[in-house]
Amino acid sequence: MTSSDVNSRLVPTITERRQAFRELHDRGCFALPNPWDIGSAKYLQHLGFKAIATTSAGFAFSRGLADSAVGRDLMLAHIREIVETTDLPVNADFENGYADDPEGVAESVRRCVETGVAGLSIEDNSWRGDKPLYKVELAVDRIRAAKAAIGDSGVVLTGRAECFLVGVNDINEVIRRLTAYAEAGADCLYAPGLHERDQIAAVVRAAAPKPVNLLIGGSGGLTMGDAADLGVRRVSVGGALARAAWGGFIRAAKGLADTGAFDGFAGATPYGELQDFFR
């Protein structure tokens, strides 16, 4: 047996990654950071995280596009690239399933499962300014269709209530939607935009025994320990890591453009460190 044969056996299979990802939701609270390209995915694995998730916003920005402007085929190619880059379970930020009708969502989900993801999320954001949220009945049918498309693959389905992101700041509506998605087959529940402890605790109680994902995309607020104390099972950061990288780039570029100074490079990671890591 060659060394390459040994190494190949050490890489977990897609089935093993899916099982590991599902088991992470059973107890405790784990971080689910969001890389936006191959390099950031590799580095997050290096840091010892147990799973990672794609970010629609972070990837869109890297392509010079706004969030939600990436088409399904390009997003599927990106998701597959991340899955093939890492040994970790990968959860796909799959936006609204790239379709309005349940049949279209099912087709998109089948294709996403084929990339090898361990999980995927479907949101109820229609991305229409006049009616930003799908009606609950349609949103439930979309979750049900996604669950059927996943079948017995072991992929974890997360149902997302986007209320707080589109200006519907009603915790009762959030809970109504999330509990309906749980009944329709969602394995995990997620309401991005929640920040208040009492609201987070209320969602955790209402969703039980289903696990809840919490988005923490800024500093100075909750910690992983706080999330665990509130009963949250997993914490993602959305596009925050990508935005942090953009922040460093913009500060350095603006300094160079505005004053001709190179002070913005002071915090840059040394070339040799990155060269050694990716070698």
Image (tube, rainbow, N blue to C red):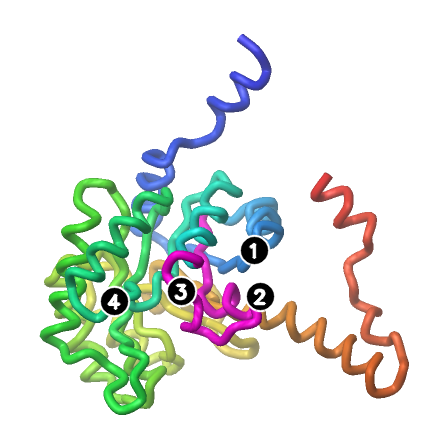
What residue did someone put label 1 on? 37
The numbered disc on residue 62 is 2
What residue did someone put label 4 on? 99
Compare marks 1 and 2 and give the one earlier in the sequence: 1
Q: Secondary structure at mark 1?
A: loop
Q: Is residue 82 left or right of residue 132?
A: right
Q: CA distance from mark 4 to mark 2?
A: 23 Å
**Residue flagged by tag 4: what amino acid is it?**
Ala
Q: CA distance from mark 4 to mark 3?
A: 11 Å
Q: CA distance from mark 1 to mark 2?
A: 8 Å
Compare marks 1 and 3 and give the one earlier in the sequence: 1
Query: Where does the magenta region start and end?
Result: 51-74
Q: Position of residue 198 (x, y in %)?
A: 31, 81
The answer to whether any part of residue 146 appears in the image is yes
In reply to whether residue 240 is colored magenta, the answer given is no
Q: Position of residue 164 (x, y in %)?
A: 33, 83
Compare marks 1 and 4 and give the one earlier in the sequence: 1
The residue lying at 54 percent from left, 23 percent from top is 7
The answer to whether any part of residue 26 appears in the image is no
Q: Is residue 11 left or right of residue 155?
A: right
**Residue flagged by tag 1: what amino acid is it?**
Asp
The numbered disc on residue 71 is 3
Q: Residues within 10 Å of mark 4 (few under 14, many from 20)?
A: some
Compare marks 4 and 2 and give the one earlier in the sequence: 2
1 or 4: mark nearer the eye: 4
Compare marks 2 and 3 and give the one earlier in the sequence: 2
Q: Residues within 10 Å of mark 2 (few under 14, many from 20)?
A: few
**Residue flagged by tag 3: what amino acid is it?**
Gly
Rendered view: 73 above or below 23: below
Q: Residues within 10 Å of mark 3 (few under 14, many from 20)?
A: few
